[in-house]
Image (cartoon, rainbow, N blue to C red):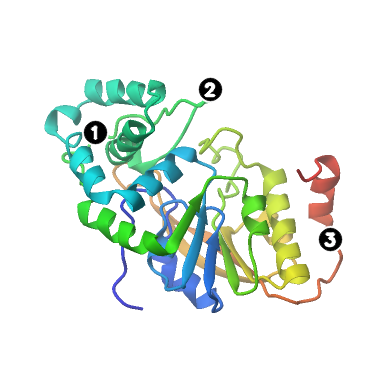
Amino acid sequence: MKKKTRAFLKWAGGKYSLVEQIHARLPEGKKLIEPFVGAGSVFLNSDFDSYLLNDVNPDLISLYKYVKARPKTLVKDAKTLFIDKNNQKVAYYGLRQEFNTTDDPYYRALLFLYLNRHGFNGLCRYNSKGGFNVPFGDYTKPYFPEEEIFKFSEKAKRARFVCEDYKKTFSRARKGSVIYCDPPYAPLSDTANFTSYATGGFDANEQAKLAFVAERAAFKRNIPVLISNHDTELTRKLYDEAEQSFVRVARSISQNGKGRQKVGEIFAYYAPGNTPRCEVNPLIQTSLSSQALR
């Protein structure tokens, strides 16, 4: 693989360090579909003819659309926020409040970039009322990712960005499509699931639904699907019908990097046309019977 391209957003759980592992497991195709695009490291470091990139977070997709449509203007305007006086706690919380109250979508996109680079550890978190609530990061001099923004914008000429339920994105796949899923990860423990990436969450029922949708896409419609997630007892059972492989990945949600440790990552590949060992994974069936797919 040629020299890797970094995403312009900081992103907890981003896939920059894993793109080689992911591409080793992705089959060839004409279009890459990502129902959970996040920071876009897989998109940036792949070479498909076209891309369909979805995320349930409207702030993220709105920013991407502006980066694609008018990168020079966005860079010029965003730079005005990356100044010393805004790298202070009082200024940060004031701008965070503006982000949560503004009705101007372009200004909100600029503030989303500012908050991402000045907030704690690249987290993206909202409270139950939909307010962005990541605390101040207190970094010496937050980096302004000008070069990365322009590279993203150039690559985005081949991409379509949507904000919708991931099941809708799956339904858009056609012959020649390849689907890569990087969903909100299953928690490693009961206390590990501390963030709410977007209002609504992604609980065990949603994890089971995703496995079900992936099975149907591969086995019924011949669309290859690759999913990455934490390696847990739950995910191994949910992805029982897939070809599973495992790696160890260094992860941290600490400001100074201490406490960084390696955790297990599972890759579940649903090969097109395979015959499932059973009609529906029993664990998935239990989830679906309690909450029907919508």
Residue found at the far front of this picture = 69
SS at mark 3 in the image = loop
Q: Quadrant of the C terminus?
A: top right
Q: Quadrant of the N terminus?
A: bottom left
**Residue 130 in view:** yes
**Residue 6 in view:** no
Amino acid type, callout 2: Lys
The picture places residue 74, in percent across and down from the top left corner, at 26, 43
The picture places residue 186, in percent across and down from the top left corner, at 60, 49
The picture places residue 229, in percent across and down from the top left corner, at 57, 57
Amino acid type, callout 1: Asp
Task: Say few, some or many: other residues with alpha carbon within 10 Å of mark 3 (under 14 / 14 to 19 / 20 or more).
Answer: some
Between 254 and 285, the residue placed more toward the observer is 285
SS at mark 2 in the image = loop
SS at mark 1 in the image = loop
Q: Distance between the residues labelled 1 and 2?
A: 25 Å
Discs 1/2, front? 2
> Which of disc 2 and disc 1 is earlier in sequence?
2
The picture places residue 263, in percent across and down from the top left corner, at 50, 57
> Which of disc 2 and disc 3 is earlier in sequence?
2
Label 2 sits on residue: 129
Between 169 and 272, the residue placed more toward the observer is 169
Label 1 sits on residue: 138
